[in-house]
Amino acid sequence: MELSERFAEALVLAEKLHRGQIRKGSGTPYIAHLLGVVSLVLEAGGDEDEAIAALLHDAIEDQGGLKTRDLIREKFGDRVTEIVEGCSDSFDGEEKKPWRERKEAYLVHMKTASDSIRLVSMADKLYNAQSIVKDYQKIGETLWERFKGKKEGTIWYYKSLLQIFDPTHSLAQELQKTILTLDILVAQNPESRD
């Protein structure tokens, strides 16, 4: 598959929307996450719409809500917009429900989500879980302070997603390995027993 000018436009828009945003706790420019997710989507066989949605998967949630959704629809069409909306657990500008409630609703939604939404979601969650493992190896238990769900909630959420994602999909298999690695690291860390 060859990517078109649409993908280039989405890349520019994603960088513009997320400019100045950094990853939780790491200080890494947020665009690194978006590029990582799109890489996983493309390597898993995603098409151009799925790749564009991967670049923009946090745009509605973090960068403008309904106004950004309308911009994505205008520039990239209904399918991309549907995937981005399907990967969001809230919209920027609306009052956010409590963390656990949002995550439970997202899990219910994922059970009936399209293959395209699941693909982008799996790539997003895999990238995030890999980042958690890397950061845990660097800073240990203090990592959990940056998460609203703390250690127990965060691990519960990722394990719950694994129950929904297709276990034969390569991204779900990588996510399972990553969560297993995290479980081992946590179990070996004396601080985690405090």
Image: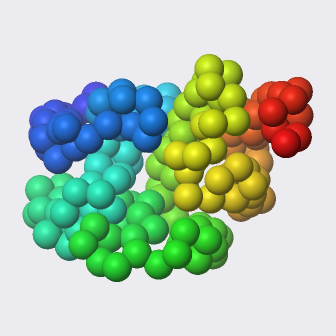
In the displayed structure, does residue 57 sit left or right of residue 130?
A: left
Which of 78 and 60 lies nearest the eye of the viewer? 60
In the rendered image, the quadrant that contains the C terminus is top right
Q: Position of residue 93 (x, y in %)?
A: 24, 72
Q: How many labels does the image show?
A: 0
In the displayed structure, does residue 160 sit left or right of residue 41?
A: right
User: Picture quarter containing residue 137?
Assistant: top right
Which of 27 and 13 lies nearest the eye of the viewer? 27
Q: Is residue 29 visible?
A: yes
Q: Residue furthest top?
A: 138
Residue at 87% from the left image edge and 29% from the top image edge: 190
Q: Which residue lies furthest to the front in this view?
A: 194
> Above or below — where is 113 with respect to 14?
below
Q: Where is residue 111 in the image (x, y as percent from the top left)?
A: 65, 70
Residue at 34% from the left image edge and 53% from the top image edge: 58
Residue at 47% from the left image edge and 49% from the top image edge: 120
> Above or below — where is 116 with respect to 7?
below
User: Picture quarter containing residue 77?
Assistant: bottom left
Q: Can residue 174 be seen in this view?
A: no
> Above or below — where is 148 with respect to 56?
below
- Specify how the rendered protein is coloured: rainbow
Q: Where is residue 85 in the image (x, y as percent from the top left)?
A: 36, 67
Residue at 41% from the left image edge and 64% from the top image edge: 88
Q: Where is residue 31 in the image (x, y as percent from the top left)?
A: 29, 33
In the rendered image, the quadrant that contains the N terminus is top left
